[in-house]
């Protein structure tokens, strides 16, 4: 891993906002592909890169090991782990609970200014080339964050950010197909329409379907990828 600090993407800026722990920084480097499966994680090198002492790095690696992102091997120490399908499934199940919870509050309290910001983010999404998967991830994160960031439950918001970081780490380097790209835009449009119409319950149902559709898509992509690797 390079010691030079590269420009942080919009999505990472949102997800790491106020959460610059060593754990989140390592997870972000896995999510953005700076650290990939099989890479050695040398505590002294990481401490230098993150300008910290060794102990916080060790604690972060232990936490990441517990979540399946790092493995410790007897002869080679810590390494970035291979993908675990079960982890992604569990994360999507948590998001399917959290996101409707956030939106049900937002739908009752959203301001005209916030809805205008959602419209602006959606316009940026529509201007992307369908091959720009990184741009889609960034602006999709921004779209959802605009709806959720106003919520009073700071602990739940931190949990959402953490789970989104984990998703980025699991499939952040995989392209999004054109069909899913276009479906995301249509699903956002429908959520926006319902929010502007004041149809709170339908907006929550539409968001739930949107999150489930995303989970189903990535489950199929990863299942296919794992099948190819085992063939």
Image (spheres, rainbow, N blue to C red):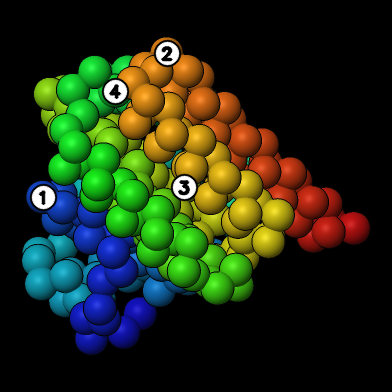
Q: Is residue 99 left or right of residue 153?
A: right
Residue drawn at 39 percent across, 18 percent down: 199
In this picture, is 183 found above or below 78?
Answer: above
Mark yes or no: residue 198 visible: yes
- Residue where numbered disc 3 is placed: 167
User: Which badge, 3 or 2, comes first in the chain's sequence?
Assistant: 3
Q: Residue furthest right?
A: 231
Q: Where is residue 79 in the image (x, y as percent from the top left)?
A: 46, 62
Q: Where is residue 119 in the image (x, y as percent from the top left)?
A: 33, 49
User: Mark 1 and mark 4: span between their CA atoms?
Assistant: 25 Å
User: Mark 4 and mark 2: span between their CA atoms?
Assistant: 9 Å
Disc number lying in front (2 or 1): 2
- Count neighbours of disc 2 (C-alpha within 10 A) and say few if under 14, some if 14 to 19, many if 20 or more: some
Q: Which of 213 and 55 is in front in this view?
A: 213
Element at badge 2?
A: helix
Residue drawn at 57 percent across, 45 percent down: 186
Quadrant containing the N terminus in the rendered view: bottom left
- Count neighbours of disc 4 (C-alpha within 10 A) and say few if under 14, some if 14 to 19, many if 20 or more: some
Residue drawn at 40 percent across, 59 percent down: 123
Q: Are marks 1 and 4 in contact (CB under 8 Å)?
A: no
User: Which badge, 1 or 4, comes first in the chain's sequence?
Assistant: 1
Disc number lying in front (1 or 4): 4
User: Which badge, 1 or 3, comes first in the chain's sequence?
Assistant: 1
Q: Which of 179 and 115 is in front in this view?
A: 115
- Residue where numbered disc 2 is placed: 201
User: Mark 3 and mark 2: span between their CA atoms?
Assistant: 27 Å
- Residue where numbered disc 4 is placed: 107
- Residue where numbered disc 1 is placed: 18
Element at badge 4?
A: helix
């Amino acid at each position: 891993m390079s010691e030079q600090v590269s420009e942080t993407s919009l999505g990472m800026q949102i997800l790491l906002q106020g959460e610059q722990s060593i754990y989140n920084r390592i997870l972000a480097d896995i999510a953005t592909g700076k650290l990939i499966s099989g890479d050695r994680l040398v505590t002294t090198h990481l401490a230098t890169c993150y300008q910290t002492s060794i102990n916080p790095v060790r604690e972060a690696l232990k936490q990441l090991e517990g979540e399946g992102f790092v493995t410790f091997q007897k002869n080679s120490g810590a390494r970035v782990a291979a993908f675990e399908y079960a982890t992604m499934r569990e994360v999507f199940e948590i998001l399917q609970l959290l996101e409707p919870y956030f939106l049900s509050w937002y739908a009752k309290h959203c301001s005209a200014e916030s809805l205008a910001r959602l419209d602006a983010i959606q316009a940026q999404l529509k201007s992307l080339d369908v091959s720009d998967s990184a741009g889609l991830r960034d602006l999709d994160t921004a779209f959802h964050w605009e709806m959720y960031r106003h919520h009073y439950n700071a602990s739940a918001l931190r949990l959402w950010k953490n789970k989104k970081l984990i998703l980025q780490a699991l499939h952040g380097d995989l392209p999004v197909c054109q069909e899913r790209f276009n479906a995301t835009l249509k699903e956002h449009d429908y959520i926006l329409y319902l929010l502007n119409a004041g149809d709170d319950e339908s907006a929550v149902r539409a968001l739930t379907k949107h999150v489930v559709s995303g989970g189903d898509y990535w489950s199929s992509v990863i299942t296919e990828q794992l099948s190819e690797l085992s063939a």
